[in-house]
Image (cartoon, helix red, strand yellow):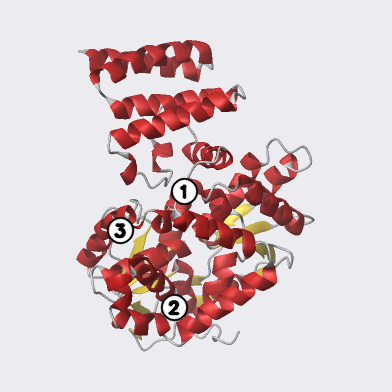
Amino acid sequence: MPADEANTLRSIAFAYQRMEQFDKAKEYFAKALEIWERIGDLRSAAFTHVIYGVYSRKQNDFKAALEHDLRARKLWLKANDSPEQTHNRACEQVCPAGVEYGNLLEVSRAELRSAGAQHGFAHGAISFALRSLWPYPKRLAAFFWFARLFRTFRLPSILLATKIPLWFFPRVAFALALLRSSTPADLKMTKTGERPTEIQLNPGDRSVTLFTGCVMDGLFGHVNAATSRVLKANGYKIGRPSKQVCCGALHLHSGDLDGAKNLARKNIEAFEGDSSHIITNAGGCGAMLLNYAHILKDDVAYAERAKELSSRVRDIGQELNSNLIDMKRDYRCEKTTYDASCHLLHGQHASGESLRLLTSVVGENYVPLPQSDVCCGGAGIYNLLEPELSSKILKEKTANIRKTGAKVLATGNPGCQMQIGAGMSLFESIEIKLCHPIEVLDEMYKRSGLYSDSE
């Protein structure tokens, strides 16, 4: 069978690839590619062009790499496969060639941007905002201030209740639902016994620095506040470099590699002079900070400094798993489920730690979410660029959430929280409380008398 022959040739190519004999690997991939194109297996052919792109980059032949990327995209489109690709890096876990798809994807986006590839209105609007607001702290702070004011007066809910945005401006309606979903959750807990909760303070004298993030600081300040309270309760001293800026993930997602690099350099300078762990509570930010070592690898002045910063990055779940207060639960949480952020899962490899942190508080009231590791359709800015396709993926996620019967959903990334919240209200007509796992622990600490909201 031709397909079996092609698979055998591909296996031989992978073997040569692992031995770093790239010319031989390309030779066998070329033979397999000829068979796949002849028999019409477009997806396998597209994957081979992706591999060619990787090899071309290793040889600094970026023109050939771009040609292979474009050819792969055309084949995926022809195979009607690319609409389902949310670029969430899940394939990295199982790729036999060890392809770092996330890095490949971001470089390809930048090359397509520099080659003048045509994009739609949404991409242009996002790029304009990233150029006009994000590099300027005062402008960005004003933008988020107005967004919070809009949210505080419940204007998204009022407008959505009229149905007018849904009928005439579906993208605006979804944006309103996203903003509404960033509202702090009112978490409920009930006392289960008469005895006081037993808490053994962790008197450590550790120091960390907190990466506050642009969206986290702008719309999810309550999560940053909860993170700080929990860290202090666990014996941490917290630093917040005043000159830190956006991590650059949104710029990288939109193909603005230069913009992302500039922000990376500013953050490297802001966090230098300290060897403590850099704590993040947003999966997208954490994955981007870890990526600094890659995007600045050719920058003589920053390459080593980027490696040093990336080596210090820890998700809040990773940091607390080994340094958590020993607390016996005396409160019962609402039925809670957990969705694994793709960037936290595949970019930081830290989703398990956040889940363990959550279950240590929720206990028997935790209910597993089917396909928790499957993307929600947010995928950076994919939901804004491809709303119809993103919604299709989101509907599968919300249907699984509905089946759990959970009253609370915790996730470690703001984009995922907003995406899922919008889906639950628009597609399932179910109001579910959305929060970060650290907020559940924070609420338990407050209920236990460890501190108050004002701290």
Q: Which residue, given by chain and number where applicable, does mark 1 sit on?
A: 119
Q: Which residue, given by chain and number where applicable, does mark 2 sit on?
A: 183
Q: Quadrant of the C terminus?
A: bottom right
Q: Is residue 336 visible?
A: yes
Q: Which residue, given by chain and number where applicable, does mark 3 sit on?
A: 391
Q: Is residue 364 visible?
A: no
What percent of the width, then of the height, locates residue 346? 45, 46
What percent of the width, then of the height, locates residue 37? 30, 19
Is residue 162 positioned above or below 45 on the image? below
**Which one is in front in this view, the residue at disc 1 or the one at disc 3?**
1
Dot 3: within a 10 Å radius of its alpha carbon, few (fewer than 14), some, or many (20 or more) residues? many
The residue under label 2 is which amino acid type?
A: Thr
**Which one is in front in this view, the residue at disc 2 or the one at disc 1?**
1
Secondary structure at badge 2 equals loop
Cα separation, mark 2 vs mark 1, equals 32 Å
| Mark 2 or mark 3: whose residue is earlier in sequence | 2
Determine which quarter of the picture holds residue 257. top right
